[in-house]
Amino acid sequence: MNDVIPVSLIVGHACARIQRGMCVCPAGTVAGRGEEGVTPARGGPVGSGGGRGLRRFEEIPHTGSSGWLNLVKFWREDRFKLLHKHMERTFNTLGPIYRERLGTQSTVNILLPSDISELFRSEGLHPRRMTLQPWATHRETRQHSKGVFLKNGAEWRADRLLLNREVMMAPAVHRFLPLLDEVARDFCRLLASRVEKEGEGEERRRSLTIDPSPDLFRFALEASCHVLYGERIGLFSTSPSQESQKFIFAVERMLATTPPLLYLPPRLLWRLGAPLWTQHATAWDHIFSHAEKRIQRGVQRLLSTQAAGGSGGTEGEFTGILGQLIDKGQLSLELIRANITELMAGGVDTTAVPLQFALYELGRNPAVQEQVRGQVRAAWARAGGDAHKALQGAPLLKGLVKETLRLYPVGITVQRYPVRDIVIQNYHIPAGTCVQACLYPLGRSRDVFQDPERFDPGRWGAQESGEEAGGGGGFRSLAFGFGARQCVGRRIAENEMQLLLMHILLSFCLSVSSSEELSTKYTLILQPETPPRITFSTL
């Protein structure tokens, strides 16, 4: 996911770690366990307008004035792992806006949709977010071009508009959706076969309890490659390629090593050959190597077809996003390579992990599961096997994905640098300030959602336009970011998840042994502390 997959997640790291065991006393003083005091607002206004005079930026409640002291505490107490929880606690203590300094970085954190809407209106023609410097340094030291994830300004906009035509627009979705559907069906066929062979119970009513996360990672990579390259890579075979398994490991290693590097000088670590940098760079090298092999195969296939008199494929044949971009000839091969690699790296964990959460929530909410299944069955019957029509006829599937990402956002922040001075919660915020919407506290706020602990895909129907508290219209669901800089792979990810969930619900009843909410941790994405075990029972 682009605005948020790794994207927004990162800035979140900057923002969290100062709030263990802190309490604000009635007089506005702060008591804590040996931590630097948190500065609360002194009787500030509730809304963005407020009733008092405009307040200075320096008056925004904050978690401590020393960025380096804050950073040391974060490292020492390993708070980055629970950054999302830190944000939630800090909002509960300080209110709907606060400042945080970590090292040299300073952010203003917000969570109300009405405030996020104001931020969106000030993002400008070339929206900017915090750069993932370890990633940028890898590209620079390896002399790789940067994709839109790491670009800013007019160069970003030019490339992004060209990419949108092949990954975001409705005609593009119609082209690649059958490929995603094919992989989702194959996944369910293989799972059904496994349940029959390894499961327990009567014939045709067998059950199997597994940790599905390894299979979901393979599904996400197989689906991504099918869409990007127009060919399958064989991860569902009895002996999937070791190269693809290594790719998945490399993505996980890249994500795990990113957070520790965010507040360290990566170029210095590169020159010193520091082990942490070496691990990070090696992971990226493997990701690029894997992508390069696939891209070269795709290019050779397209050239062979063109030499035979075709235009990249037989009429009506979809040659993958790679083929579409090459055929259009508007991006250089080097830029195509950079963006395809970013889409691959960002399209595995960021869909496989939300699918884990979705399956678990369906398992522990049987009434919700039956409601969604009923709508899916009816839509599937009407669609006559047409996946696009089936999805259109089952809006609860879209609600299911949105509800999962409300409670478990992959990336926990979305950042912007406003191009003009703005006012949020009656505080003046200068242009160029890093302001981030914090998605985990947003999704669980009683000021924004009614009964936020309840898992309810139906809440995204009639109340989609923001009738619930908090205002801000569509700024309650931001897992893919917002505006021109939203996740470039959004349409792929949304349809990939909806299609797999649709076919699973048509084939299996899901159950879990515990009704407790999953414990979560934050690396560069929000994920379960321990992958949940799901029981799949054939219908």
Image (tube, rainbow, N blue to C red):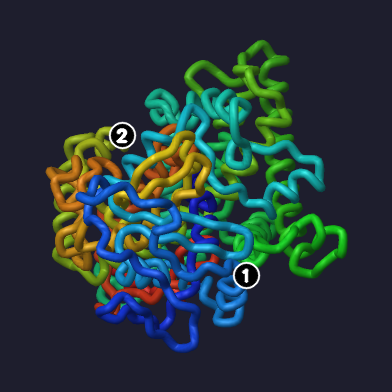
Does dot 1 land on a helix, a strand or a loop? Answer: helix
Mark 2 lies on residue: 388
Specify the amino acid type for callout 2. Answer: His
Closer-to-camera residue (475/144): 475
Mark 1 lies on residue: 68
**Pointer 1: residues within 10 angstroms few (<14), some, or many (20+)?**
some
Specify the amino acid type for callout 1. Answer: Trp
Depicted 532 relative to depicted 152: above or below: below
> How far across and down, in percent of the image, does residue 447 sit?
20, 59
User: Residue at horizontal 44%, vertical 27%?
Assistant: 172
Does dot 2 land on a helix, a strand or a loop? Answer: helix
Q: Which image quadrant for residue 355?
A: bottom left
> How far across and down, in percent of the image, does residue 127 sit?
50, 35
Closer-to-camera residue (410/319): 410
User: Residue at horizontal 19%, vertical 57%?
Assistant: 449
**Pointer 2: residues within 10 angstroms few (<14), some, or many (20+)?**
some
User: Residue at horizontal 19%, vertical 65%?
Assistant: 454
Task: Tell me which label, 2 or 1, sits earlier in the chain.
Answer: 1
In front of the other: label 2 or label 1? 1
Depicted 479 relative to depicted 420: above or below: below
